[in-house]
Image: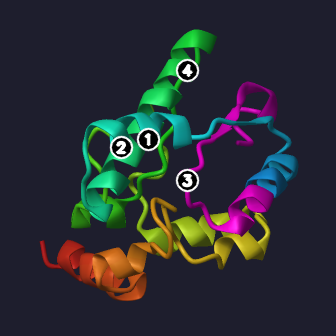
């Protein structure tokens, strides 16, 4: 953010049909905190079209939602001559916790080399409000979804395991 400048950044909020209520306020607060505009585009109409054609499991719908988000991000980026920045980190990448052609896709992945706890450390260093750092990590793809529940392991254990693998390779 500091190296690029807030005037060069636009945020898109693409809520799924069941986003946690606090996400709307959190996104607005982050936009204000960073000094960037946030544009909101509901995924509901797009997902409704898919639901007319086919039904699927909660996980499959979550993956579809991630892919639709990326399509909309690239549509917006193409229209406005922008790059899409991703939020994938090394913990998620090494454990396969991403959606192919969804959140794994971006023009630039600035934090891909960082473990999840290192992302939090940098966020603290940048003085991002603690409410965002301490928020339970979730893609918000369906009601009650959390990253650690999906992974069936907490990030502390995952990061320790990955560090151990790095040290012994």
Q: Nearer the viewer, mark 4 or mark 2?
A: 2
The numbered mark at residue 77 is: 4
Secondary structure beneath dot 3 equals: loop
Q: Which residue is mark 2?
A: 51
Q: Kindly check if marks 1 and 3 are in contact, taking CB atoms under 8 A apart as contact.
A: yes
Task: Give the residues in magenta.
Answer: 1-26
User: Are dots 4 and 1 in contact, CB under 8 Å?
Assistant: no
User: Neighbour class for label 1 at 10 Å: few (<14), some, many (≥20)?
Assistant: some
Judge left or right: residue 103 versus residue 123.
left
Residue 34 coordinates in the image, percent (x, y): 81, 47
| Nearer the camera: disc 4 or disc 1 | 1
Mark 3: give few (<14), some (14-19) or many (20+) Cα within 10 Å.
Answer: some
**Does the CB distance between marks 4 and 2 fall below 8 Å?**
no
Q: Is residue 57 left or right of residue 90?
A: left
Q: Nearer the viewer, mark 4 or mark 3?
A: 3
User: Which image quarter is the C terminus in?
Assistant: bottom left
């Amino acid at each position: 953010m500091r190296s690029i400048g807030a005037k060069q950044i636009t945020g898109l909020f693409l809520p799924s049909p069941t986003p946690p209520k606090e996400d709307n306020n959190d996104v607005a607060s982050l936009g204000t905190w960073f000094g960037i505009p946030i544009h909101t585009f509901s995924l509901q109409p797009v997902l409704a079209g898919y639901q007319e054609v086919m039904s699927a499991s909660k996980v499959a719908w979550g993956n579809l939602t991630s892919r639709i988000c990326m399509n909309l991000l690239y549509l917006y980026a193409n229209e406005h001559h922008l790059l899409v920045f991703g939020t994938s980190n090394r913990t998620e990448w090494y454990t396969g916790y991403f959606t192919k052609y969804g959140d794994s896709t971006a023009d630039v992945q600035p934090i891909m080399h960082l473990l999840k706890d290192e992302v939090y450390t940098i966020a603290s260093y940048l003085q991002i409000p603690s409410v965002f750092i301490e928020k339970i990590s979730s893609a918000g793809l369906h009601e009650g979804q959390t990253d650690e529940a999906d992974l069936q392991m907490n990030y502390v254990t995952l990061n320790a395991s990955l560090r151990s693998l790095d040290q012994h390779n």
